[in-house]
Image (cartoon, grey):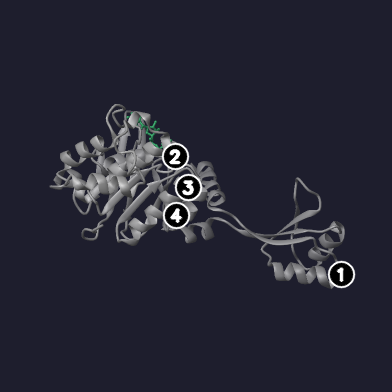
């Protein structure tokens, strides 16, 4: 696939109100090419509304959502610049997958040869002649992704692309997004599957109540909003509690199993050494790092209290 000139998405002081509801509230961020950017936020945070404004499907109340420095309406061949999958179910059920893609290609001034290429790319080469209404949810997702890619765009937006995909499909979609970014494209996707986002995204944009909460590399986000602790299991709980306390560690017990202790701000080397020095037997010694999900829940919970 060919990559067009460097592409990016830019939200500038973007606001969208629906009556009394402020769905998007003074949002500014930029999405870079060559990396996979995850768009994260709780239900109702304003993700879909923001994506719709980039695609010209919703008009900002104020501010601007630009694609390659332009409003979408100003681009002569938008489908060759940006492709999106917002709702994979938005396909006529009696139309075949190939006919659906051919109609989209025709409307976008894209050569018909892209239909077979794109069906192949998403693993539907054998299913192009079948009505989309007969497709499973996972196959519809693949067709939605094909629709986004038909114009060979430099920018792709996927809203919940992993919904309905089986484990093999999820792995496929993950590597597709990574490949698209490696080709220099701009990839923005939203997902509620945070484990998947952690495996797929390089960069995160986090919003809550329509406002920007974070715009940073995924690893930096996790480091900034989580902590590490040592989990240690011992048959001599009292002895270890005593030894750790003497060494200045504030230890908490696991609510579910009394023989498990949690030691914040410690290393496994240090805890292992303290235990050995007191001849205390350990049956487990693990450094536990919080996940993206932990980081996200911590951050949105904090913000909720502050709001
Ligand atoms: N057409 C509309 N009319 C009125 N309110 C709307 C409309 N579209 C969205 N909203 C409201 O705007 C807010 C943001 O919705 P949006 O769908 O953008 O959130 P989201 O982050 O995509 O949520 P989800 O993860 O649940 O899809 C919500 O309060 C929603 O009810």
Closer to viewer: mark 4 or mark 3: 3
The residue singled out by tag 1 in the image is 279
Bin the neighbour count of mark 4 within 10 Å (Cα to Cα): few under 14, some 14-19, many 20 and up.
Answer: many
Q: Position of residue 284 (x, y in %)?
A: 76, 60
The residue indicated by pointer 3 is 168
- Ligand 1 sits in which quadrant? top left
Name the residue that disc number 2 marks.
163
Q: Quadrant of the N terminus?
A: bottom left
- Separation of marks 3 and 2 at Cα, in angstroms: 13 Å
Nearer the observer, disc 1 or disc 2? 2
Determine whether label 1 and label 3 are within 8 Å by CB.
no
Out of 146 and 125, give the one closest to the viewer.
Answer: 125
| Residue density around tag 2, few if under 14, some if 14–19, many if 20 or more, within 10 Å | some
**In the visual, does 305 lie left or right of 240?**
left
Q: Check disc 4 and report the residue beneath it.
A: 200
Can you tell which quarter of the image residue 103 is in?
top left
Mark 2 vs ligand 1: CB under 8 Å? Answer: no
């Amino acid at each position: 696939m060919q990559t067009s000139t460097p592409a990016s998405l830019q939200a500038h002081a973007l606001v969208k109100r629906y009556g009394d509801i402020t769905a998007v509230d003074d949002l500014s961020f930029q999405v870079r090419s060559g990396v996979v950017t995850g768009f994260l936020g709780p239900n109702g945070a304003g993700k879909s509304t923001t994506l719709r404004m980039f695609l010209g499907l919703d008009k900002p109340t104020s501010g601007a959502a630009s694609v390659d420095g332009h409003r979408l309406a100003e681009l002569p061949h938008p489908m060759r610049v940006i492709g999106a999958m917002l709702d994979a179910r938005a396909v006529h059920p009696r139309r075949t997958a190939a006919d659906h893609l051919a109609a989209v290609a025709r409307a976008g001034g894209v050569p018909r040869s892209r239909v077979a290429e794109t069906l192949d790319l998403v693993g539907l080469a054998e299913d192009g002649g079948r009505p989309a209404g007969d497709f499973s949810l996972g196959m519809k997702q693949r067709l939605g992704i094909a629709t986004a890619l038909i114009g060979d765009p430099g920018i792709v937006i996927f809203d919940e692309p992993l919904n309905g995909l089986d484990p093999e499909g999820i792995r496929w979609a993950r590597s597709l997004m990574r490949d698209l970014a490696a080709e220099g494209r701009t990839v923005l996707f939203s997902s509620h599957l945070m484990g998947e986002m952690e495996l797929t995204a390089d960069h995160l944009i986090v919003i809550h109540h329509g406002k920007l909460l974070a715009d940073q590399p995924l690893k930096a986000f996790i480091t900034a909003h989580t902590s590490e602790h040592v989990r240690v299991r011992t048959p001599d709980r009292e002895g270890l509690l005593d030894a750790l306390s003497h060494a200045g560690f504030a230890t908490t017990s696991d609510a579910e199993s009394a023989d498990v202790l949690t030691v914040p701000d410690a290393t496994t080397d240090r805890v292992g050494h303290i235990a050995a020095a007191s001849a205390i037997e350990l049956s487990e010694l693990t450094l536990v790092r919080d996940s993206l999900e932990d980081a996200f829940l911590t951050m949105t919970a904090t913000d909720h209290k502050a709001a």
